[in-house]
Image: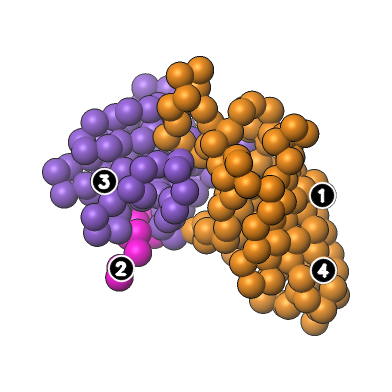
Chain colours: A orange, B purple
């Protein structure tokens, strides 16, 4: 079963607007990553945030992480039609010994449509 | 530098057949992970290999298997195909799986008829 829930499931906005996607997860993590996928193609890595970080920026992307609420958000500012894609959060899990399981667990994704 | 290469891109197989998919990781990456993506179940972890050893396995039946070669290239095999195996199969390579920097290939789209 999926580790995380993402909302909204779908988001439709106009070019120039901001898009915010949220991700919640259930267990302790050592990092959380966001990926983009265009039309069922491969996943493109966007940004990684570690469990000891609260906020990170990369270009038009801003990611926040709240480990107490087990949630993260991805903000895309000044969106463009080319941002139209599915966005996934992925967590890396820690076991009781603190060793990564070495796998990513994905949320169900948010489908973002940006209208020109 | 070359990315992660998956072959073939598309595949159509008949129920009961078997299939082998290939993944060539980024040069220097020793970890290769495999994922299955379907509309109903989303992205699910299949297994991860590091230096020719399977270190982790997801909750899939034994029909799904894999291996990794000394050059880090990996293959996954699905035997006795079922209609429900139709999916996009993605592989990711990294220095350390799940620690960040997991780079994905474009995937193999498998259709079972």
Q: Residue B17 versus residue A70: which sits nearer the camera?
A: A70
Q: Secondary structure at mark 4?
A: loop
Q: How many marks?
A: 4
Residue A2 image point, x, y percent: 63, 32
Please say if A18 is above or below A111: below
What is the spatial separation of the Cα atoms under label 3 and label 1, in whole angstroms?
Answer: 36 Å
Q: Nearer the viewer, mark 4 or mark 1?
A: 4
Residue under label 2, please give it: B2
Please say if A21 is above or below B19: below
Residue B30: which disc?
3
Question: Which of the chains bears the disc numbered 2?
Answer: B
Q: Secondary structure at mark 2?
A: loop
* Residue bounds of the magenta highlight: B1-11
Q: Secondary structure at mark 3?
A: loop
Q: Residue at x 70, y 61 (%)?
A: A62
Residue under label 4, please give it: A18
What is the spatial separation of the Cα atoms under label 1 and label 2, in whole angstroms?
Answer: 35 Å
Residue under label 1, please give it: A8
Q: Residue at x 69, y 71 (%)?
A: A60
Q: Pointer 3 and pointer 4: residues touching (CB < 8 Å)?
A: no
Residue B77 image point, x, y percent: 31, 37
Location of the C terminus of chain A (image quadrant): bottom right
Q: Residues within 10 Å of mark 4 (few under 14, many from 20)?
A: some
Location of the N terminus of chain A (image quadrant): top right
What is the spatial separation of the Cα atoms under label 2 and label 4, in whole angstroms?
Answer: 33 Å
Q: Nearer the viewer, mark 3 or mark 1?
A: 3
């Amino acid at each position: 079963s999926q580790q995380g829930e993402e909302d909204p499931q779908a988001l439709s906005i106009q070019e120039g607007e901001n898009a915010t996607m949220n991700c919640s997860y259930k267990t302790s993590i050592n990092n959380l990553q966001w990926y983009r996928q265009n039309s069922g193609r491969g996943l493109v890595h966007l940004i990684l945030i570690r469990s000891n970080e609260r906020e990170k920026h990369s270009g038009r992307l801003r990611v926040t992480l709240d480990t107490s609420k087990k949630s993260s958000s991805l903000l895309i500012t000044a969106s463009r039609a080319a941002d139209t894609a599915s966005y996934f959060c992925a967590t890396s899990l820690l076991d009781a010994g603190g060793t990564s399981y070495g796998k990513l667990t994905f949320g169900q994704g948010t489908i973002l449509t940006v209208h020109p | 530098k070359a990315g992660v290469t998956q072959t073939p891109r598309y595949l159509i197989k008949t129920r009961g057949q078997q299939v082998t998919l290939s993944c060539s990781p980024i040069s220097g990456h020793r970890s290769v992970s495999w994922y299955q993506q379907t509309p109903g179940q989303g992205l699910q972890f299949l297994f991860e290999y590091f230096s020719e050893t399977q270190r982790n396995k997801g909750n899939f039946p034994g029909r799904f298997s894999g291996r990794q070669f000394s050059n880090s290239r990996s293959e996954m095999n699905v035997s006795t195909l079922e209609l429900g195996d139709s999916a996009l199969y993605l592989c990711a390579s990294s220095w350390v799986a799940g620690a960040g920097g997991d780079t994905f290939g474009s995937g193999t789209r498998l259709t079972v008829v």
